[in-house]
Image: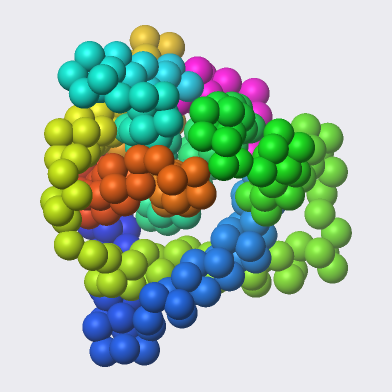
Amino acid sequence: MDLLIGFTTILVVIAAGIGLAHVGVLDARSQRTLGEIAFFVASPALMIITISKVHLETATKNLVASSISLAVCFLLYVVLARLRWRLTTGPLLIGALTSSYVNAGNLGLAVAAYVVGDITVVVPALLVQMMLVQPAALVVLDRVTGRGEGFGKAVRRLVTNPLTVAAVIGVVLALTGWPLPEVAEAPLELMAGAAIPMMLMSYGAALRLSPALGKAGHNGEVLLATVLKLAVMPVVAWAVGASLGLEGTVLLGVVVTAALPTAQNIFLHATRYRVGEDVARETILITTLASLPVVLLIAVLLG
């Protein structure tokens, strides 16, 4: 019953976003604004409040399972796409990221909260992606396209990313055991409460406003990335997590995190560097549409 209520809650709020976009209350610009408020204000507040209370020593196995599942799908895409389509480094890298880089910071928080009952399960994946995968990918894209902003600006973007900063603050508080002063905790909790509804309504509006699929001529690459993202990655996460002794809610959280859709910022990188834009856009849309049924199936099997 809790699972049904959780999914119903998510779907109702997403439907509200779809409805607002359909009647014109939310257009593309206001949808982005809603998402940016969640990204820059509400989600960081939620991250600080949540991570500061987590026991980090229990997250190590989650970190290992998340990292291995990401690496396996990334490498599988690189090998298969290179053999099949002879892709150059830029499009190959963007495609590999679409097959393995999960939307842990936005939709992931909502799914973790209402399906798993604990948003800290997405933190290890979020940290690996933000602190390791994304910086390395940007450096490579910088070099192969010549369109980047340089290594220094890439690093500056990383350390000023609001979710990265919030995660670091939360980790420091968790490691030291320092409590947040009430004068800081109260407004953070108030802002954190807006994060999930804003993210879900922005997500719903984006679904309504998205362009048609399948017209860019990269259907094979999109299909490969989608299958790796929504089928292979959760299975690898389950296999690794179970072999490490994870069970119950912790194992469910690891597998659900792996089944999240591709993160939207992969499309931002593709657009900035002008490589793999069609593959990124269509894979993000398809995995976003298909991920909730996949997550529901996982929750039924493991919950």
Name of the residue lying farthest toward the top: 243
Name of the residue lying farthest toward the front: 146
Query: Is residue 267 rendered to the left or right of residue 55?
Result: left
Residue 265 vs residue 296, the one in the foreground: 265
Q: Quadrant of residue 156?
A: top right
Residue at 52% x, 74% y: name it: 33
Residue at 37% x, 81% y: name it: 27
**Residue 20 sits above or below residue 104 on the image:** below
- Asked whether residue 63 is drawn in magenta, I would say yes
**Residue 70 sits above or below residue 270 on the image:** above
**The N terminus, quarter of image:** bottom left
**The C terminus, quarter of image:** top left
Residue at 57% x, 61% y: name it: 39
Image x and y of residue 45, in percent: 66, 59
Residue 231 vs residue 173, the one in the foreground: 231
Residue 53 vs residue 66, the one in the foreground: 66
Q: How is the image coloured?
A: rainbow
User: Does any portion of residue 258 appear in the rendered image?
Assistant: no
Q: Which residues are magenta?
A: 54-66
